[in-house]
Amino acid sequence: MTRLLPERLIPARLAPGDVLRVGAAGLRARPARVVLSALGIAIGIATMIAVVGVSSSSKEELLRQLDRLGTNLLTVTPGQTLFGESAKLPKTAVEMVGRIPPVETVSATGSTEAKIRRTDRIPEEITGGIAVQATTLELLTTLEGRASAGVWLNEATARHPSVVLGSVAAERLGVRHVGVRVWIAGRWFTVTGILDALPLAPEIERSALVGWAAAETYLGFDGHPTAIYERSADGAVEAVAAVLSRTVSPENPEEVDVSRPSDALAARAAAEGAFTNLLLGLGGVALIVGGVGVANTMVISVLERRREIGLRRSLGATRGQIRLQFLAESLLLSALGGIIGVVLGTFASFGYAMWNDLPAVVPPWAVGGALGATLLIGTVAGLYPAMRAARLSPTVALVTA
């Protein structure tokens, strides 16, 4: 007699749409808990997006500023002698630098011992940190600056008691208009101009600039430049920098310092990048805390839904399908928090940029990385609860529920 073997039962397959519906059903049943859990993820993601966005906007502004100002400006200043004393640049240094073929324009300033005050009634020791410097007429052209009020020095005013104030110097003196007089070295000088900001030469912003000849006549200036500014073709900057010190002081080139002011802005951009990494680490900590909250929510969900798990297992659901269901819930919960975080972080970045008049930049890699991190956190957070749910026996789950 032939025995009939029972046919092997083949479990139904869950399509991707079915997995999403089953996972979303578990979330819809507990909306308050879902919102609170997603909020932890959202805060972490929003922090990371905002940090990257604000940093990228500031860095983009610096790079645009570098493009506007150019990177072909070099500065020559006196260094120290062999005995540690302050060196002096030769009086002919400006003319010598001007003879270098790639140099397009060159100018200089020279320090004086004079002090500037708003009136002769102010004590001499109160100077506001403003330096009085002699200047050549080409300075504004070399620095590619402009006057926000009045005019720059010319052949006539450079020989008389006239002064042009840097933006910071004018603010500290309380001078807002040209034509007023200021007290320098026991003499009244007329303010003929106020300069705009000069990011590549902040020392000029804090200076009162007097014509070279006038400084020699009225301020006892010795004629030695203390800073030389030159611009050359972009492709010749390195070559010019290599010969500047020997050109300025052929006998003692080691006493001459050559620098590139644009390097300070580039270093500032790099420093902001390092600071961004620190803040990203803090955002990562917030994201991990949010992931722990998701894991806790999923564990509690498994404990509360034993009857559902037992019933589904009794109706033929496999361990893998149960595992997939709870893993899908965890991923959906994390994705919800991630999307909210991306939106909040993007709005925060654009708001900061608009408020500070910066270009609004949120790198696509930051958004992609944030969503990728969200899915990773969701997978890790939901893995243990999903495995725990899959291990539940149908009988035990129904009896103990």
Image (tube, helix red, strand yellow):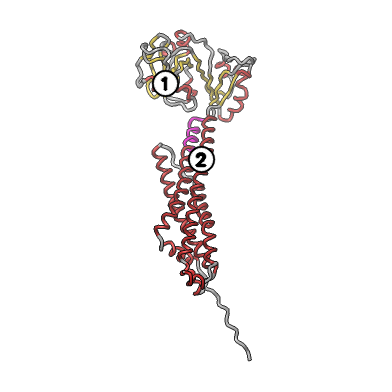
Dot 2 amino acid type: Thr
Residue for point 50% across, 74% down: 314
Residue for point 52% across, 10% down: 222
Q: Which of 28 and 167 is in front in this view?
A: 28
Dot 1 amino acid type: Ala
Q: Label 1 neighbourhood size at 10 Å, few (<14), some (14-19), many (20+)?
A: many
What residue did someone put label 1 on?
Answer: 169
Q: Label 2 neighbourhood size at 10 Å, few (<14), some (14-19), many (20+)?
A: some
Q: Which of 321 and 255 is in front in this view?
A: 321
What residue did someone put label 2 on?
Answer: 276
The answer to whether the residue labelled 2 contacts the one labelled 1, judged by CB atoms less than 8 Å apart, is no
Q: Would you place residue 359 above or below residue 180 in this image?
A: below
Indicate the position of residue 366 as horizontal and vertical percent values.
Answer: 50, 47
Q: What stretch is highlighted in magenta?
A: 59-70
Indicate the position of residue 328 as horizontal and vertical percent values.
Answer: 49, 62
Of the two numbered discs 2 and 1 in the rendering, the one whose residue sits closer to the viewer: 2
Indicate the position of residue 315 as horizontal and vertical percent values.
Answer: 49, 74
Residue for point 62% across, 22% down: 243
Q: Which of 204 and 374 is in front in this view?
A: 374
Indicate the position of residue 207 as horizontal and vertical percent values.
Answer: 45, 19
Secondary element at tag 1: helix
Let me know if residue 377 is in the magenta part: no
Secondary element at tag 2: helix
- The disc at residue 395 is none
Report the number of numbered marks: 2
**For residue 171, what is the image quadrant?**
top left
